[in-house]
Image (cartoon, rainbow, N blue to C red):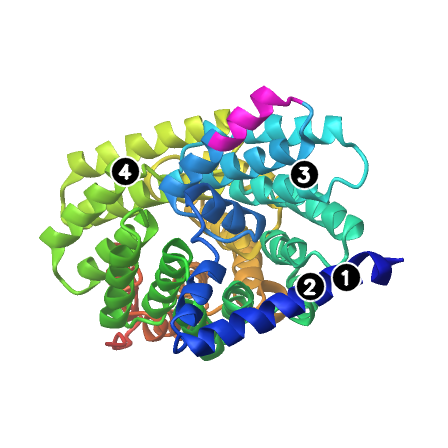
Amino acid sequence: MDNLLYGPVRRRARRALIVSVAGAAVLGGTLAPAARERAAPPAPGPAARALGAVTAAVPAALPDLAALIGEREARVRADPGDARSWAVLGAAYAEQGRRTADPAFFPRADRALRTSLEIAPRRNADAAQGLAALAVARRDFPSAKWWGEVARRLDPKRWTAHALLIDAYTGLGDHRAAGRSLDRLTGLRSGPAVMARAAAVHRDRGRREDAAAEIADAAALAEAPAERAAYLERAGQLAFERGDRQTALHYFEQALRTDPDQRAAQAGQGRALAALGRTPQALTVYQAALARQPCPAFALELGELYESLGLERAAQAQYDLLRARVREAAAGGADEELVLGLFEADHGDPGAAVRRLRDEWRRQPGTAVADALGWALHRAGRDEEALDFARAATEGERGGGVRSALYSYHRGMIERELERYGAARRHLQEALRINPYFSPLHAPAARRALRALGEAPVD
C-alpha cells in the first residue's frame, strides 16, 4: 500500500531531479548553488534555541529563555489543555530561576509542571523531567531523585533523566549511584553535555586531570554560547580548585566574553583576581556580579574578602544581603541551608548552624553537608563528633574522593583542637598543597596554624 501510494511520487521526483540536473548542466551549473541555498534550513530563532537547551537540560541564554517563556505563555493562554507547552513553560521558568538566582521563578515552574501532569497524568516524561530539573535548581535532591527516576521509568532511553539523576545522587552522597547513572548516560549519548556530567563525576571522585580534560573538551565542542560559557566557567572552577589562579582567570574571562550573563564566571573572576593580589579589581568584579545575580554564595565570598581586608562594615553589608537572599530563596522553595550554615558557623551563631545543618544532613547527606556540619560542630566546641563528619567529607569511600582544600583545612583544624597534631599537620599541609589560595580568611589561618604546630607552611 505504501509503495502504491508513494511510488509514483518518488518516480515523478526522480524525473524532476533528472530534468533539473540536466538544466543545471546546460546553464553551466548555475542552478546548483541556488538549489543548495533553498535546501538550507533556516537558523533557529531565540525561542527554538531555548527550547533545544531546556529539553536537553543544558544552559540556555537569558534572552532566548525570555522569548521561549513569552511564546509558551501565549500558547497555554490560547490552549490551556496543551500539556506539552505547560511542561516546556515550567522547565523554562526553572532554568530562568537557576540562571538568575531569582527564586520567584520556582513556584511558577512548579505550577506549570504540575498543570501539565494534571492534564496528562500518564506517561508524562516531559513534566517528570522538568520537575527533576526544578528540584536540582532548588537543591532539593530527594525530590530530584524521585522525579528523575520517574522520568527514567517512563522513558528508559531519555538520556537527560540520567544526567539529572547524577546531580540528585551526588547531592544525596550516593556516589556509586551517580557513577552508574553516568555509565547509562554514556551508553545512550555522547557530546558536550555528557562530557560536562562526566567531568563533574570525575571531580567528585578526586580524578582532577580527567575532570579538567572532559570539561575542556565539552567547552570546545559546545556550539551554543550559553552552554559553552557554562562549561568554561566550570573549567575555571576546576582550575581554581587546584590552585591555578591564572588559568582559572583565563577561563572565567573567556566565559564572560562568550556569554555576558554568565554571572558565576564573573564571581569566579573576582575569586581569581583576589587570589592574584589584584584586590581592587576583585572587589569591583564581585560587586558587578552581585548586582545582577545576588546569589548567597557570592555574598559570602565577597563578605569574607572584605573581612580579610579589615573592612568590617562592608563585610556586614554582604552578610545581611546573604541572610535576606536565603529568606527569599526559602519563600521560593529553594534550599540555601548549606551556605547559611557555613556563614553562621564562621560569622554568626555556631549552635544555630549545627541545628540547621543537622536537619540538612538528615534530609540530604551529601559530601558538602558533611563537611559543613563537621565545621559547625567544631565551631560549637563539639570536636569529637565534628571529626566523624570531617572524615566523612574527606575519606574516599565515604566522601567520594573529592580533593578539596577547604575540607582538608576543616579536618586539620578539628584535629588540632583534639591534639592530634600529626594528623592536623598532614591535613593542613594538604589543604595548602591542593590550593594555597582557597580562601582569603582560611588559607592564612591554615598557615598560622602550621607555624603554631612548628611546621613550615606550604607555599
Which amino acid type corresponds to the residue marked 1 in the rendered image?
A: Pro
Mark 4 or 3: the one toward you: 3
Of the pair 425 and 368, the residue shown nearer to us: 368
Inspect the image, locate mark 2, and give the three-letter code of the amino acid beneath it.
Arg
At a point 65% along the width and 54% down the height, the residue shown is 165
Few, some or many C-alpha atoms within 10 Å of disc 3 (few <14, some 14-19, many ≥20)? many
Q: Which residue is mark 1?
A: 8
Query: In terms of secondary structure, where does tag 2 sit?
Result: helix
- Range of residues picked out in magenta: 71-80
**Rendered image: mark on residue 292:** 4
**Which of the two marks, 4 or 1, is nearer to us in this view?**
1
Q: Nearer the viewer, mark 2 or mark 4?
A: 2
Query: Badge 2: few (under 14), some or many (20 or more) residues near its Cα, within 10 Å?
Result: few
Using the numbered discs, state the Cα–Cα distance from disc 4 to disc 3 in whole angstroms: 30 Å
- Counting from the top left corner in percent of width and height, residue 366 is at 58, 53
Q: Which of the two discs, 2 and 3, labels the residue nearer the N terminus?
A: 2
Which mark, by number, is residue 127? 3
Dot 4 or dot 3, earlier in sequence: 3
The reply to whether callout 2 and callout 4 are in contact (CB within 8 Å) is no
Q: In terms of image quadrants, where is residue 176?
A: bottom right
Q: Confirm whether residue 343 shows in the render.
A: no
Q: Are marks 4 and 3 in contact (CB under 8 Å)?
A: no
